[in-house]
Amino acid sequence: MQQTATKPERRIPALAVSRGVGIGRVVFLQGEKRHFFRIDLEESQIDAEILRFRSAVTECTLQLNEIASHDPHDSNQPVASIFGVHLLIIEESSLVEKIESVIRDRGVNAEWSLKVVTDKYLAKQNSVADLHFREKYLDIEDVAERLMTALIGSPSMVQLTYSGAVVVARELRPSAILEINNSNPAALITERGGWTSHTSILAREFMLPMASGIRNLERTFSHGDCVIVDGVNGQVIIDPDTDTLAHYDKITAAYTVSNDLPDVISEKATTLDGVEIAIRANVDIPEAYQLARHFGAEGIGLFRSESLITRPGKIPSEDEQILAYNQMAEIVGKAGVKIRTFDIGFDQLTGDGLSSELNPSLGLRSIRFSLQDSTYFRTQIRAIFRAAFKQSIDIVLPMISGVSEILQSRTIIDEERASLAREGIEIGSPKLGAMIEVPSGVFTAREIARRVDFLCLGTNDLVQYLLAVDRDNDSVADWYQTLHPAVIRAISEVISAAKSAGIPLLICGEMAGSAFYVPLLIGLGARELSMNVNSIHQIRRLISGISLSHLNELIERVKTCETADETETVLREHYLANWADLFPPGLLNSKHR
């Protein structure tokens, strides 16, 4: 793209929620805000109004079934799963019933009843403390918008005018992503939307670069602005100069996945001197592994089972979980899948936003909650045991802070194994792993390692808890330092603990999928990495071009560093001197905390 404007270049930090680089001109999401009017009905009109509403529900159900069964991409299951959630909202929740009740009890039109009910749903959803669940309000809002469109016969608010554009919106619903993607936009920018939202998941599935967390969009951007969305380093560049455009034109090629890849890359990722590195996939949607395997993934290293909870309080039953786990295991095969047990708190379990904690990250959540209220934990353990029959499935316990949690968990696991045996139900033998992501887990990793079959290291939370920095708080972003010496020492200690116990260690989190950090991890002794699907191809290429002998020299230098900035400089200098051609253009010029 040529830049004709003379305005000075501006760079704005952002949250990268879908990797890649997109260059285009700003187009704001089109569509007018709905206006709602209350119409009081006569008694004789109520039944007809309810029939009118039911007709809209039927139309929406048909639309969602059509969307869920057709995806313009080869791998259609992520879309089917997400819009299957929308079907559940219509078919199995109380939404439709409550709207009909408002029509009948208050004697008002369907549009107004829809607004009254969904406003209550959205208010409750937004009160949930956990960001992952709070963001699900977009799914409810999406369903409400679809129903409203069916009621009033309006065309879709999303117009297919976004070819090659950078689409800017305060927020994007999953339906908007699906329709926008059909017109091949360059990238997406939103004010709201975290890594775990359905919108971000779809952006990654469609390989659309996306940046979020930019406030005052209308003041920051103008229609037609030339913009670069840097989904690698987390920034948006407005009115880039000629040199910047040329620089990023080269980078975009590095993030363009070839359609000529073989059906399945079966070779293991191996360094120049023959060290094998197992690359596994982090997935929230089971079927996403089909694409991961295409890129060379060896199994699912982390399945966040809480992704099965479509809304707060809607914990899947034992049979529902068995079905989901079986689907994953069948897709993955012998490579296996590691299921992290529900990493949730009280408000997610009950759907009661009023009972949220002041500081949920340090509160009653994850393994703590599983052990305090073990009902749903026991159900999940039973489901995993049953799904593991003749399947390769393992259990990962999250947020382990010491041996006592392992002992308590094993007691429950043993009890449920015995119970299933008494019932004559066939079960498998899943291995047990512990997720190390808090400081106490690091300092007792050697003791923990003697009690489990494998360890997982969650780098995102490890940095947050070790440095006492909220990774979602912009005001302390500079203190979130992945390369802090304490973080590197903690990683080294956990790797050493696993090695001493003779058990595998799997590293998850953003470090495992970032080219800048992977050589450091391998040099420290990591041999298994689990990452998001879009990182696999790039990381495999990097691994194939580095050697352990060079890494040993690098690690010795890193161990002498006293600050994150010093460590970053040492890594960058080594990469530039030895492996500059292995990194995407621009990556080594960017800041890495």
Image (spheres, rainbow, N blue to C red):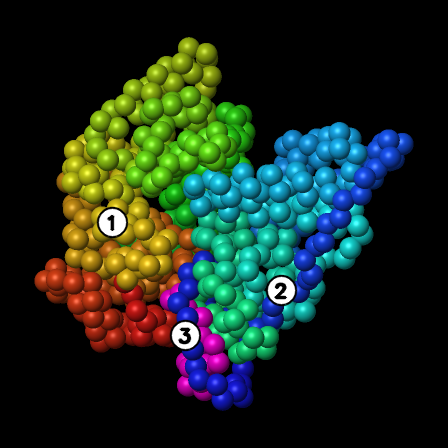
Left/right placement of residue 123 relative to residue 491 reads: right
Name the secondary structure under disc 1. Answer: loop
Residue 211 in sight: no
Which is nearer the N-term, disc 3 or disc 2?
3
Name the secondary structure under disc 3. Answer: strand
Query: From mark 3 to mark 2, how far is it between C-alphas?
Result: 22 Å
State yes or no: discs 1 and 2 in contact (Cβ < 8 Å).
no
Give the label on residue 468, or none: 1
Outermost residue to the top: 422
235 falls in the magenta region: yes
Which is nearer the N-term, disc 1 or disc 3?
3
Which is nearer the N-term, disc 1 or disc 2?
2
Badge 3 amino acid = Arg
| Position above or below: 321 against 541 | above
Q: Which residues are magenta?
A: 232-249
Q: Quadrant of residue 225?
A: bottom right
Q: Residue at x 35, y 34 (%)?
A: 365
Badge 2 amino acid = Leu
Looking at the image, which is closer to me, 84 or 53?
53
Which quadrant is home to the C terminus? bottom left
| Residue denoted by label 2 | 29
Name the secondary structure under disc 2. Answer: loop
Q: Residue at x 64, y 69 (%)?
A: 162
Give the label on residue 11, or none: 3
Badge 1 amino acid = Ala
Looking at the image, which is closer to me, 59 or 157?
157
- Estimate the x, y position of residue 89 in percent, counting from the top left: 63, 37
218 falls in the magenta region: no
* Pointer 3 local density, CA inside 10 Å: few below 14, some 14–19, many at least 20: few
